[in-house]
Each structure stands twice: as C-alpha cells, then as structure tokens.
Image (cartoon, rainbow, N blue to C red):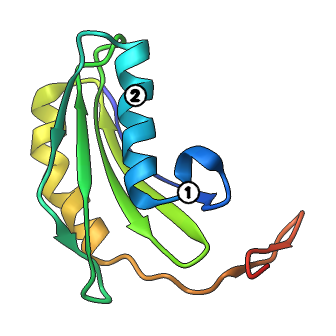
Amino acid sequence: MSISDFFHSTTVSEPSYATLKDAIKSDQKDFQEKSPGITIKSGKMIPIASGKKVPVQQFLKDRFGNYEAVAYVDEEKVIVLLAHSSNNLKEYKKSYKNFEKLIQSYRFFDNVIEGDRGFDLTH
C-alpha cells in the first residue's frame, strides 16, 4: 500500500493546458483512454491561501487500481497540479483531509524559476 502527494506544473503555452478548463478536459480524456472503466468525479472547490478556490478532479480505480485526486491551480504563466494518490481506497479516503489541508496551504511565489537549467516563465 502506498500513498503519495506530488506537485507538477506546466506552462499555459502547452496546447492541451492552454486554459484551466483545457487542462482538466485533457486529463479526463487521458485517464479515460488509458483506463476505460475509470470513475471520474468533480470534487469540491477548495480555497487556497490567497482565497481563490481551485477545482479538484478525482480519478478512481485506474487500470493499475490507483485512486488519485488532482487540484488544478491556475496561475498567470503556469497551471500547477497538486496530486494525491494511493493504491488503496481506504487509505486514500483516510488521508484525503490532509490533501485538502495541503491545497489550502498552497502559495504561489514567483514566475521566475532558477535552478540547474534555470528558466524564466515571464516571457
């Protein structure tokens, strides 16, 4: 049994993620194509630290038996994905409140990211 929370962002210039609505539709389509029997539910909107509310999608019982929730945070230059995943439904449900708390604590810092391959999202 495993539980994991992870973060991912993609620039809004990526065609399938041009808007928040596009990002959600793209993920729904991708999950449905890879796991035809999957259950997809829209979760409640959860407020983040700024007060903005973000949508959550739940992807339940994919082809590998995983349960996943994804919060989509629409920022100026990127769409940030906060994900919660488990291969055990009981543990997924048990830890979901902590995932909500993680979402509520989210803060966006800057469009400029510096690192090994530093790049600037302000262009």
Tell me the residue that label 2 is attached to. Answer: 29
> Which of the two labelled residues, at mark 1 and mark 2, occupies the earlier sequence position?
1
Residue 12 position within the rendered picture, expressed as x and y whole percent measured from the top left: 60, 62
Q: Is residue 79 above or below residue 69?
A: below
Q: Is residue 36 above or below residue 118?
A: above
The CA distance from mark 1 to mark 2 is 15 Å
Say what amino acid the circle numbered 1 marks.
Answer: Ala
Residue 56 position within the rendered picture, expressed as x and y whole percent measured from the top left: 24, 53
Query: How many numbered dots are placed on residues in this image?
Result: 2
Taking the spot 67% from the left edge, 59% from the top edge, the residue there is: 13
Residue 104 position within the rendered picture, expressed as x and y whole percent measured from the top left: 25, 75
Taking the spot 28% from the left edge, 24% from the top edge, the residue there is: 87
Indicate the quadrant where residue 89 lies.
top left
What is the secondary structure assignment of the residue under circle 1?
Answer: loop
Is residue 105 toward the left or the right of residue 90 in the image? right
Taking the spot 74% from the left edge, 75% from the top edge, the residue there is: 121
Tell me the residue that label 1 is attached to. Answer: 18
Residue 122 position within the rendered picture, expressed as x and y whole percent measured from the top left: 74, 82
Taking the spot 86% from the left edge, 71% from the top edge, the residue there is: 118
Q: Residue furthest right?
A: 117
- Tell me the tag on residue 3: none
Viewer-side residue, 15 vs 36: 15
Q: Residues within 10 Å of mark 1 (few under 14, many from 20)?
A: some
What is the secondary structure assignment of the residue under circle 2?
Answer: helix
